[in-house]
Amino acid sequence: MRRNLPLILVLLALAGAAVAYYELKIRDVNPDVPFVVTPPGVVNRMLEVAGVTKDDVVYDLGCGDGRIVIAAAKKYGCKAFGFDINPDLVGEARANVEKAGVADLVTISRADIFDLDLREASVVTLFLSVPVNARLIPQLQQLRPGSRIVSFAFHMPGIKPRHYFEEDIDGRRQRIYLWVTPLEKE
Ligand SMILES: C[S@@+](CC[C@H](N)C(=O)[O-])C[C@H]1O[C@@H](n2cnc3c(N)ncnc32)[C@H](O)[C@@H]1O
């Protein structure tokens, strides 16, 4: 037993490190909403209703696989930034950016969206949830006048949309909300 003591201590240390790493990963990833993709037709329509041009700076909060920022850069030639809390999705989005040939325009970062300063954005895209949209209001109020916020499926409680679109897109009824800053209370 005594002879095996160093080995036992090393094994215990390794087990402790594995548990700590696992707990850290769980806490780190912990998204406020799960990863679900926006259908391609809806991505195109969101960018269209937001009136994106090459001079815009598009932020996708919770960018998943990067499809919205990639589409914005490819179609409009604008700069676009995607943020996600999940490191696996950040890796996937970065690979997709490379594959799409838009690495000069698109930046993907790992971040908690509630820590972001949004003042550099002129267009913000969201596919999150109603409570998460509500929590983002103080940050969205910091956007410069004339900035556009476009949300797939979810409204922003207490804030009047400039337009609400309910349309058939690729054979399904879809909802898109558009706000223009300064935000107007309901
Ligand atoms: C419904 S998915 C939308 C993905 C992408 N925007 C799209 O439309 O295809 C929401 C994304 O938000 C990310 N997310 C959830 N909570 C987050 C947080 N607090 N900070 C950053 N990303 C978050 C999730 O990891 C997920 O990728």
Image (tube, rainbow, N blue to C red):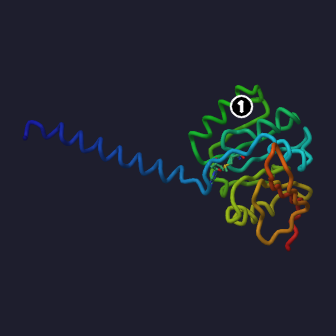
The front one of 100 and 1 is: 100
What is the x, y in percent for residue 14? 30, 41
Asked whether mark 1 and ligand 1 are closer than 8 Å, the reply comes as: no
Q: Residue 94's image quarter?
A: top right
Q: Residue at x 81, y 56 (%)?
A: 175
Q: Residues within 10 Å of mark 1 (few under 14, many from 20)?
A: many
Judged from the image, the secondary structure of the residue bearing numbered disc 1 is: helix
Location of residue 56 by image quarter: top right
Residue closest to the eye, 174 or 76:
174
Measured from the top left, where is residue 114 in percent x and y?
A: 66, 58
Q: Which residue is drawn at the image coordinates 49% and 54% (left, top)?
A: 27
Look at 77% across and 29% down and name the residue there: 102
Image quadrant occupied by the N terminus: top left
The residue under label 1 is 97
Residue 151, relative to residue 47: is it above or below? below
In the depicted structure, whether residue 14 falls above or below residue 62? above
Q: Quadrant of the C terminus?
A: bottom right
Q: As shown in the figure, which amino acid type bears the numbered disc 1?
A: Val
What is the quadrant of residue 98 in the picture?
top right
